[in-house]
């Protein structure tokens, strides 16, 4: 039985200061947003299900109302991720109970079909509650979840007209990278290896001080956190597209330390250079992913003479029209790490307000270790290979919710477009 990532309700805050208005995956306080999966558009409203443990409050799971309107569809489903097995779900309007029809499930998700007209018929009710019958062993517990926000979402969505153009995602991973031609297993091994910052494959020094990474079972994400999980953590999920490649989706839950974000981004970039033909732009940036304003550190004018006008600590204001004036390093670094087109840079000189434009050309470089095998190196990291049962010993008072799946038709985890990195890819990559 698949169970997942711990989340303290008392610390459920926005996960990414880069885009505070956008909901990011694994941020499980009540949210709503637009999800884009392989061009398919769904709108979602989330309500956290809570429970009490001693004197504290924790998230026991969540209830998602999902509206799938792709291609003229008008499908409404309720997805429940909760402890035990949800055997029955219904809305209670004052004293009138509206049962929901159960649907086949996947993973740790429980699905129920919603008839929006039945919900709208009772929207004037004083009390609006979601009832969940949850079976654990031979015992059935009934949870009562306040549901006015879910009912309001159904009402608002029912009244919306179809948008003229395709919407942008507002809910999804914090940071997504596509690895063409790489299968999920090999990518997972490469990222797990580089989460500990070794110099190169085969290096005997595999461990470092700082955050701990946990290589969970293969149907679970990688997890980066300190052992106390004091502030937050980074998760890495993998979605393979047969015959094309694999997405690595990084999500920052709660408020991770900068170093935990840095480690995930570092591992993604190192794995990319190992496994994928990539481009070099001859620039590095000052500081880590969260640094702002964005300034230039090193310039390789030997390989890129077109950068001769660029000076150390000059400020980077935009790339290919993407505004970076108030941006953070991770935005610019993403385009430098994964771009494959010429990049038009607008910069500002260090000691003046003078701006200038430079076009830097990509230099194609082959994958460093295209056939890289990390199996032996990972075997030496046995103390970091956490088994599912150990999750409960690690933090026994917390529930581990299911993976983020947004359709009962999905066989498992699928990539969703990132609100943050999808626009960056659009501005720096050709058709792949």
Image (tube, helix red, strand yellow):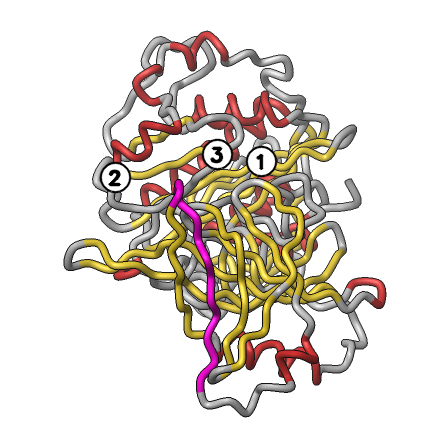
Residue at figure coordinates x 32%, y 55% from the top left: 255
Q: From the viewer's perspective, is residue 217 above or below residue 9?
A: above
Q: Nearer the viewer, mark 1 or mark 3?
A: 3
Nearer the observer: mark 3 or 2; the answer is 3
Residue 266 appears at what percent x and percent y? 44, 35
How far across and down, in percent of the image, does residue 143 sit?
Answer: 39, 63
Q: Earlier in the sequence, mark 2 or mark 1?
A: 1
Residue 164 in the figure: left or right of residue 156: right
Name the residue rendered at 55%, 11% in the picture: 373
Circle nearer the viewer, 2 or 1: 2
Viewer-nearest residue: 229 or 284: 229
| Near-viewer residue (66 or 421) | 66
Q: Determine which of the numbered discs, if any, sits on residue 238 in the image.
A: 1
Element type at marker 2? loop
Residue 403, given in percent of the width and then of the height, sits at 52, 44
> Residue placed farthest to the right in the image?
72
Query: In the displayed structure, does residue 201 sit left or right of residue 418?
Result: left
Determine the CA span between mark 1 and mark 3: 19 Å
Q: Residue at x 78, y 28 (%)?
A: 243
- Relative to the observer, which residue lies in front, 192 or 413? 413
Tell me the tag on residue 1. 3
Residue range corresponding to the magenta coloring: 127-138
């Amino acid at each position: 039985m698949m169970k997942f990532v711990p989340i303290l309700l008392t610390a459920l805050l926005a996960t990414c200061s880069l885009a505070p208005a956008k909901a990011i995956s694994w941020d499980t306080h009540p949210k709503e947003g637009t999800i884009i999966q392989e061009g398919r558009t769904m709108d979602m409203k989330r309500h956290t299900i809570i429970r009490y443990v001693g004197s504290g409050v924790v998230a026991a799971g969540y209830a998602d109302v999902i509206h799938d309107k792709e291609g003229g569809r008008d499908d409404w489903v309720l997805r429940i991720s909760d402890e035990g097995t949800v055997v029955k779900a219904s809305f209670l309007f004052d004293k009138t109970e509206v049962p929901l029809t159960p649907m086949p499930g996947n993973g740790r998700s429980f699905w129920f079909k919603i008839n929006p007209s039945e919900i709208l018929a009772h929207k004037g009710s004083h009390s609006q509650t979601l009832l969940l019958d949850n079976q654990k062993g031979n015992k059935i517990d009934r949870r009562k979840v306040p549901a006015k926000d879910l009912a309001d979402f159904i009402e608002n969505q029912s009244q919306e007209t179809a948008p003229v153009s395709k919407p942008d995602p507002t809910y999804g991973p914090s940071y997504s990278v596509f690895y063409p031609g790489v299968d999920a297993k090999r990518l997972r091994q490469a990222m797990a290896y580089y989460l500990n910052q070794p110099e190169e494959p085969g290096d005997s020094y595999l461990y470092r001080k700082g955050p701990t990474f946990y290589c969970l079972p293969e149907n679970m994400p990688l997890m980066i956190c300190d052992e106390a999980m004091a502030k937050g953590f980074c998760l890495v999920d993998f979605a393979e597209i047969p015959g094309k490649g694999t997405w690595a989706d990084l999500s920052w839950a709660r408020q991770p330390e900068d170093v935990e974000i840095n480690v995930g981004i570092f591992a993604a970039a190192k794995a990319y250079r190992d496994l994928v033909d990539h481009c070099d732009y001859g620039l590095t940036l000052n500081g880590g992913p969260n640094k702002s304003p964005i300034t230039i550190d090193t310039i390789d004018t030997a390989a890129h003479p077109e950068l001769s006008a660029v000076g150390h600590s000059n400020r980077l204001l935009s790339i290919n029209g993407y505004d970076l004036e108030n941006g953070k390093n991770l935005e610019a670094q993403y385009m430098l790490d994964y771009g494959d087109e010429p990049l038009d840079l607008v910069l500002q000189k260090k000691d003046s307000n003078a701006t200038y434009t430079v076009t830097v050309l990509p230099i194609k470089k082959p994958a460093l270790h295209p056939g890289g095998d990390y199996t032996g190196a990972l075997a030496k990291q046995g103390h970091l290979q956490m088994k599912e049962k150990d999750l409960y010993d690690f933090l026994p008072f917390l529930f581990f919710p299911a993976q983020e799946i947004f359709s009962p038709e999905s066989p498992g985890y699928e990539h969703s477009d990132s609100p943050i990195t999808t626009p960056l890819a659009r501005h720096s990559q050709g058709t792949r």
